[in-house]
Image: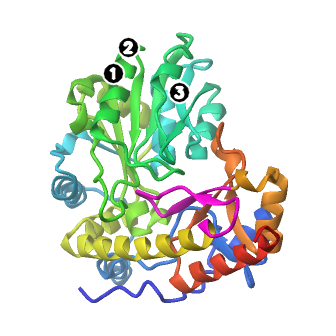
Amino acid sequence: MSTPNFDEDIDRLGTQCSKWDDMQAIYGVDPRTGISMWVADMDFRPPAAVQKSVEDMAAHGVYGYPGAHGPYLDAIRWWMKNRHDWEVQPEWILTAHGLVNGTALCVDAFTQPGDGVVLMTPVYHAFARVVRAAGREVVELPLTQKDGLYAMDWDRWEGMLTGKEKMLILCSPHNPGGRVWTPEELREVAAFCERHNLLLISDEIHHDLVMPGGQGHTVLANAAPEVRNRLITLTAATKTFNIAGAHIGNMIVSDPDLRKKLTQKMAAMGISPGLFGLNMVAAAYSPEGAEWVDALVAYLDGNRQIFDAAVNAIPGLRSMPLQSTYLAWVDFSGTGMDQAEIERRIAQGAGIAANHGPTFGEGGQQFMRFNLATPRARVEEAGRRLTAAFSDLQ
């Protein structure tokens, strides 16, 4: 495999790219002069094998109904075994149109309007969005901090449920905080769900993007196999390989009763994968793809160090130590500024489009999330712009 060029500056404007084409409308930041650091996709090309799979389809020129999913399923099983030490059977794999769709399918299949769905907040904002859109109630369990990292607060949480809750959605690794949960923490989550009779949805989409030198990701199904009768694991190649436009992701369900109910819901809604996604994932989950991910993570780690050094040098700002993902979670509470002023300085002063912390739920106030999966020169420029935008604090 040739060395990926993550420093390449790829112009994404005008390509129906949410990250760049929507930043003016959403954040008021001109994409021609600004830096897009919000929505979680990367400004990098995927591995050459993925690009070749698309080119081969284009050369063939016939785009009919896909079938014979064997190569796709085999690739997923190979990846989970070789990268995560997880033995997955082909019949366990149900394929949705991405993991937001997969989350919504689980909410629809296993809860009723008015039921509570538990989230550990702050957390990925799409969870709350689909839960509320389905007429369910979001029940927030606020994370605490220990040694500057998010931690689960079992003593506080135990008395916060009312009995109407039917499901807990875990983000593992955690977005936006970047925590890699320990096996012990995952077992505590499983035990909590057993005590409260909650279906457990473990969204592990960031599981391949773990920073070097730290603790590795543990699949919840491996950490707590005793909860297989209440566990659905969500995985996807889309975050790892920057192919979110393929809209494909997996719900991996070992329990036959859960799988039957979810399969019935998918059949009722006509859910089936597209041809391009099947082929792109089969190409990505390969030895070449594995080498590419290793190079990617090393590059992201360099970006993380550069961004954190710049941010943490600004009085009142603190970037949470990033164990996983490419999303920096920055605490601005030490500035004494309110959320509106923080957002104004970043968008208008620095010309950066970044996610607003409150959209991630309770605990997100006075935080902002920055996407570091972009060429290093842009990360360095973002650091300079933030330093200038908060220069009165120096």
| Membership of 180 in magenta stretch | no
Is the C-beta separation of discs 3 and 2 under 8 Å? no
Q: Is 105 in front, or is 166?
A: 166
Q: Which residue is mark 3?
A: 118
- Tell me whether circle 1 and circle 2 mark residues in contact (CB < 8 Å): yes
Tag 3 near tag 1, CB within 8 Å: no
Residue 277 image offset from top left, x and y in percent: 38, 63
Labels in figure, total: 3
Closer to the camera, 20 or 321? 321
Q: Amino acid at mark 3?
A: Val
Say if the magenta span includes residue 330. Answer: yes
Q: Give the SS element for disc 3.
A: strand
Q: CA distance from mark 3 to mark 2?
A: 14 Å
Q: Residue at x 55, y 19 (%)?
A: 112
Is 61 on the left or on the right of 121, as rendered? Answer: left
Q: In the rendering, at what x and y percent does residue 271 appear?
A: 44, 44
| Marked residue nearer the N-terminal end (3 or 2) | 3
Crowd tier of the residue under label 2, counting other residues whose Cα lies within 10 Å: few below 14, some 14–19, many 20 or above: few
Up the image or down, 390 lies above or below 180; here it is below
Location of residue 152 in the rendering, given as x and y in whole percent from the top left corner: 46, 33
SS class, disc 1: helix
Badge number at residue 195? 2
Query: In terms of image quadrants, where is residue 18?
Result: bottom right
Which residues fall within the magenta stretch? 312-331
Label 1, on which residue?
Answer: 191
Q: Residue at x 41, y 57 (%)?
A: 324
Image check: 118 left or right of 302? right
